[in-house]
Image: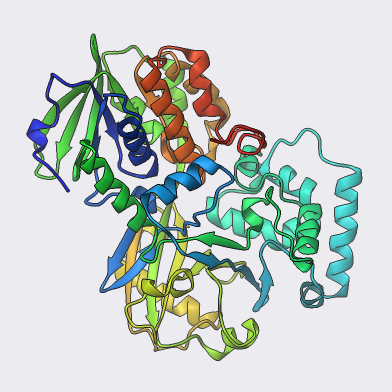
Amino acid sequence: MEQDTANATPTTEKLCLIAGAGPAGLTTALELLRSGSGIKPVIFEADSQVGGISRTVVYKGNRIDIGGHRFFSKSKWVTQFWASVMDMPERSRLSRIYYLRSFFNYPISLSLDTLKKLGLVRTVKVGMSYLKARAFPIKPEKSLADFMINRFGRELYGTFFRDYTEKVWGVPCESISPEWGAQRIKGVSISAVLAHALRSALHIRSKEQETSLIDAFNYPPHGPGQLWEKAAEEVLRLGGEIHLNAKVSRVKKTPQGWAVTVTKADGTNLVAEGENFVSTMPLKDLVASLDGVEVPQSVREVADGLVYRDFLTVGLLVPRFAEVALKASGGKVRDNWIYIQESDVKVGRVQVFPNWSPDMVANPEHVWMGLEYFCNIGDTLESLSDEKLKRLGAEEMAKIGFINAGEVIDSCVIRQPKAYPAYFGSYERIGELQQWLDKQPGLLAVGRNGMHRYNNMDHSMLAAHAAAELIRKGETANPEARKALWNVNAEKDYHEAGKEK
């Protein structure tokens, strides 16, 4: 896939330089090429493969999906984009919570089975606290805790949401902005769950279904990276360029547009120039790399204060699930992923890769699972060696009854830095950074880390689509037009009320 990087930027062409070959970067490139804009995208990717956090990692024939990626969107444009790249089979969705060594549906279904497992006393408390939250909501919502309590009641929040969320972010929910909830679980509440349960019982599929409540999704046979590898092939076929092992280390404003310094795997540098530069780099890194443009001290303070949460996946290959898990699950574990609410282990979530696609495991007789841990660079968990992380994963899975001790066939560790942009630190001031960026013609930020938003994949693609439109129409110097980027996933009806294409 990689071409001669030294010849990446012939001066006779109109170029758009792109940092990152994840969903946002590849979508931007394909949109520019397919629209007939006459602008050639040149992508620089720091990794050795495309896909970003949506890549598929292969270990001895076993495939790992970094974080789990359901191909589902309310946007017709996004679903049509995916279909234009490849056909994907539909998969049944099952996600559950493992708590008190029992499985609970996720989102909470409030079925008779759920109420039985919760017990009479806790069920009554759940109902009473929800009614109280509805009658006396917390106003204004100052934290993620307030957001969740208003929608689920304090008892259900404390039972199923607080501990897992704090395991993910490493800080109390009271310290997290309510915007995290607005990004990830907006529209979901007990009333929404009950309505979803009724529709399911009557076999009615709602067009307005919340992402957290979907029953099925599309998924490539070889994981999410398969689609983005095909997208990359299409970029090359249409005349774009993709350069792997090429990290953008400096971004400079020039009279003609933007120039980027790219550091290759061998340590050598090259400079590429283009009229436009689309960044999917973390905002913190983008601002730190800027040159040739005056960045106000307040903007640098916001960028420096942005916080990220890192991610570890421990892949475990085992011959079978243990009887404890099978019995608790009703005879077979069919989950795509399982949220681990148990407080006596550090693992936050478990993916069962063959349940996403049978082709994710080399030997169909084996169980191939991914244990997900959340950490910060330099903390105790992140500092553990791969071998210690493998042992920790095996010990924790045996402890909660998922596997039998001593039955691990093989294991591996995948580390993903800056997986989650955090809604604390300087996030409350991010508007200052957004407004300043919107005054920089030709410089556009898209993607999860590029916009510092905990977006789903389709939201990153929609922002990339908006960026490509701005570039194609020559409106990157129009702050008002650039609001289309930041409006993606900012309002509940963005993908629902006539804005789909």
Question: Is 389 on the left-hand or right-hand side of 479?
Answer: left
Q: Nearer the viewer, residue 444 or 217?
A: 217
How many labels, in total?
0
Where residue 29 appears, as percent x and y from the top left, is 31, 35
Residue 106 in which image quadrant: bottom right
- At 60% from the left edge and 46% from the top edge, which residue is drawn? 184
Relative vertical location of residue 137 with respect to residue 202 in this rendering, above or below? above
Instruction: Kindly tell me whether residue 421 is visible in this rendering.
Output: no
Image location (x, y in percent) of residue 79:
50, 47
Which residue appears at 86% of the width and 55% of the height?
A: 129
Residue 105: x %, y % from top left: 68, 69
At 31% across and 62% down in the image, what residue appears? 57
Q: 473 or 337: nearer the eye?
A: 473
| In this picture, residue 136 sits left or right of residue 405 | right
The percent position of residue 411, horizontal first and vertical second, equals: 33, 75
Depth order, front residue of 172/263: 263
Residue drawn 35% across the image and 63% down it: 384
